Amino acid sequence: MFDSTRQLLADRSSAAARLRALANRADPRRPDDELPDDQTWTEEPGAPPPVRGYVHGGHGRRWLVIGLAAVVLLAAGIGIAVASGGPVAEPVSDLPAAANTPTAAPTVRSAAVRPSTASTPRIVVSVRGKVRHPGLITLAPGARVADAIKACGGLRHGADPGALNLARKLADGEQIYVAIPVPPGADVAVAPSADGDAPGQSKVDINTASAEKLDTLPGIGEVTAQRIVQWRQQHGRFASVDQLQQVPGIGDAKLASLRDLVVAG
């Protein structure tokens, strides 16, 4: 770009110099300067007056030269402006070659499969006795007696679980009697305890049970329960379950129904 601009400026200076030389060149036919003193111009009669600009050169030629110089200068200026204002090509730098690196495959995270409820084993137990909603309940494996009572709405008002082991783990198909004695011949399916024996339902201790607890035994009403408590107050502890026959209202048949439900501790 700069080389072309310098060339245009040089051409313009050369053209201007030639035009100035042309304008200042002497005209050999100017009437006032080049005729001898003893000669004068004589106009031919009837001839038209001479045109100075064309016949004698003079000022007409000078203005023509000046006009041409102006045109040359204007063209040179336009050329310089175009040359200086035009876009300049920038050298394109070599781009680094793209690394031929294989694209890493996106990591696919597999969603963890959550076990369905249907595949989780459950246990079903039957709860009877003094709970708010007795019946069949479904519990998770490892549930305990306390969990079964809670699932049934809890104990009724005033109910006492007594010696029932609330921490015992339950087995599928088990039946629990809460705050009532196990009826004779009841099918109680329980898991074996740590010592290998079936825990069953806790027996009622006739030496420590309250009248309300004794009232939960089958065939023992409120009156008979009060008589058992009075017998203890009069005679002390029961030495054996058979001594219940000494309590008024308990005969052989009733004693037989109570034998597996009570203990004289």
Image: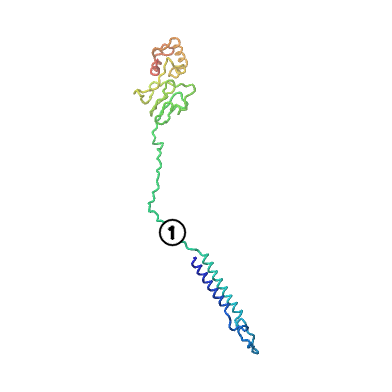
User: Residue extending furthest top?
Assistant: 234
Where is residue 245 drawn, in percent x and y? 41, 12
Depth check: give the residue in front, 247 or 98.
98
**Few, some or many residues within 10 Å of mark 1 (<14, 14–19, 20+):** few
Q: Secondary structure at mark 1?
A: loop
Where is residue 6 drawn, in percent x and y? 51, 68
User: Residue extending furthest front?
Assistant: 37
- Quarter holding the C terminus is top left
Depth check: give the residue in front, 182 or 196.
196
Q: Is residue 208 above or below residue 49?
A: above
User: Residue extending furthest bottom?
Assistant: 45
Q: How many marks?
A: 1
Q: Is residue 16 above or below residue 170?
A: below
User: Residue at 43% of width from left, 59% of height from top?
Assistant: 93
User: Residue extending furthest right?
Assistant: 45
Where is residue 197 drawn, in percent x and y? 35, 22
Q: Which residue is mark 1?
A: 93
For residue 243, which quarter of the picture? top left
Where is residue 205 drawn, in percent x and y? 41, 17
For residue 254, which quarter of the picture? top left
The figure's colour scheme reads rainbow
Q: Amino acid at mark 1?
A: Ser
